[in-house]
Amino acid sequence: MLSQSSLLLIIASWFLFFVFCLRWTRAKKTPVDHPPAVPGLPVFGNLHQISSLPHRSLRALAEKHGPVMLLHLGRVPTVVVSSSAGAQEVLKTRDLTFASRPDSSLADRLFYRSQEILFSKYGEPWRQMRRIGVLHLLGQKQVHSFRKVREEEAAALVARIRAAAGGPVNLSDMIIDFTSDLTCRVALGRTYADAKGCGSQLRALSGEFMELMGLFPVRDYIPWLAWIDWLSGLDGRAKRIGLEFDALLEKVIAEHRRRKLTAKIDADDMDPVDILLSLGDSNEDGAAASSSSNISLTMDNIKGIILDMIVGGTDTTTATLEWAMAELIRHPEEMTKVQEEIRRVAGPRGEEIREEALEGMEQLKAVIKETLRLHPPGPLLLPRESMETTELQGYCIPKGTRVVVNGWAIARDPALWDKAEEFLPERFLVDSGAGALDFKGIDFRYLPFGAGRRGCPGSGFAIAALEVVLASLLYHFDWEMPGGMTAEEMDMDEVFGLVMQKKSSVILRGRPFKD
């Protein structure tokens, strides 16, 4: 007969065996491991390993630690995804779980407490604003309605280059003028270039704004060192730019309100500011509401959405056009191919390229797609935040974790792209393997405008502008480096910000083309 101690030992052994089996079974069903962590420093974590070009330093770290890795940026755990499969899981499979944005002190100070589309937390207010953007401001119908504006501004750009009589021109400055005037006419109703200093003020503000949004405020990652942001001048710059932009938006809104009081505006003549203000009259607590819908906007919402359109529409288009022209200068055989196509399809049509002719310009579209692959406007997609504990590529991602998708690294992944570092527009022609790829985030090898719920709602407008102005530049002029410089001397250095821009201006000589 078993002794009491032996019986207890058997019972304990069976109990431990049962617990082990239960834990082993659960471990098979749920992820318990966190992504591989990149070793860092106490307090600072991995901040010292992020260079002034974060997309490049993060790719280098991913090559060592894996396509899904965990960094600690100060106190902020951040998962960086550098694979197509991981991006698909974040932006599609678990899109809702990762649909929110993390806190950002810069976004709060510059984008009206993040009460707009880009940086707002996920929830009903954001869904309302996104719905407004898609249905009333940036939908296909609205994009098409601004066709004439795009054609006119492209023709005005051509006229300014012609005025240089074949001499060297700062094409970057001229492109900035084009995108600024186009965005203002579309978003604000007029260019503001005729107002004293207003046009140049907006262009200067937009550039500084984008640069500022690419910085890493110390207060967001190590709060007790927030004084460094004051000492470095970051706080002062953010305050100044925020106040200057707010003064400009106040002026724009006041003008639209005066116009509404003095003249009846037909629905077809309403610009985005009119539409936002028409959702309802401001009441005592600053809210605007529409009696015909459940939409409710505060004045911060209205200003924030207008600001989204200005900074998003100006710098994204400017940067992509600069990169496209720089790459074509460096690859004259590609320049010749696309010019021959444009001139054949467009024919002798005078000063303006008509948008209906663009449909037949497959080489032009391929050049734009390849430019966006090598130089995506946002190399790091805007960060997301997990709203609940979830799984990502087999790893456990706790609630509140920041997730960053390195779209730049994915677009240059040699496992996904043949000759990934080379400019080869032919890869995007219809008969090529990548020819069917578009800008809508359906294929996760190619994410120039993001994907999912937080994908860029203005991609359609950006592409329409890119196509007509690039076609106009290549139709009317033969381009070359000035002063006997060679194409190899074109500077291709980058500046990281909310949009990745060229570090130096594109200075070229444009000789008018004659049939």
Image (cartoon, rainbow, N blue to C red):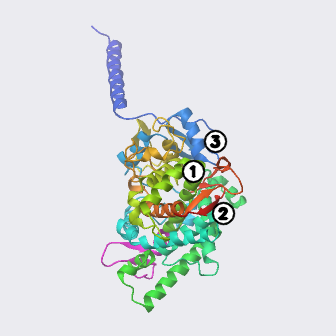
Residue 105, numbered label = none
Instruction: Say whether marks 2 and 3 touch (CB < 8 Å).
Output: no
Percent position (x, y) of residue 384?
47, 51
Observer able to see residue 332:
yes
Query: Badge 2: how crowded within 10 Å, few (<14), some, or many (20+)?
Result: some
Left or right of 185, for residue 129: left
Q: Going from the N terminus, do you reach mark 1 or mark 2 first?
A: 2
Reply yes or no: does residue 416 show up in magenta: no
Kind of residue indicated by mark 1? Glu
Q: Which residues are magenta?
A: 280-305
Q: Residue at x 57, y 54 (%)?
A: 323
Residue holding disc 2: 235
Q: Nearer the viewer, residue 417 or 340?
A: 340
Q: Going from the N terminus, do you reach mark 3 or mark 1 first?
A: 3
Q: Is residue 196 above or below residue 58?
A: below
Q: Nearer the viewer, residue 102 or 333?
A: 333
Residue holding disc 3: 49
Left or right of 330, for residue 282: left
Which residue is farthest left?
Answer: 1
Question: Which callout, 1 or 2, points to the residue nearer the camera?
Answer: 1
The quarter in which the N terminus is drawn is top left
Q: Secondary structure at mark 1?
A: helix
Which residue is farthest bottom?
Answer: 262
Q: Going from the N terminus, do you reach mark 2 or mark 3 first?
A: 3
Kind of residue indicated by mark 2? Asp
Q: Is residue 499 above or below residue 242?
A: above
Q: CA–CA distance between discs 2 and 3? A: 23 Å
Q: Quadrant of residue 269?
A: bottom left
Reply yes or no: does residue 285 show up in magenta: yes
Q: Nearer the viewer, residue 401 or 354?
A: 354
Q: Residue at x 48, y 47 (%)?
A: 425
Residue 327, numbered label = 1
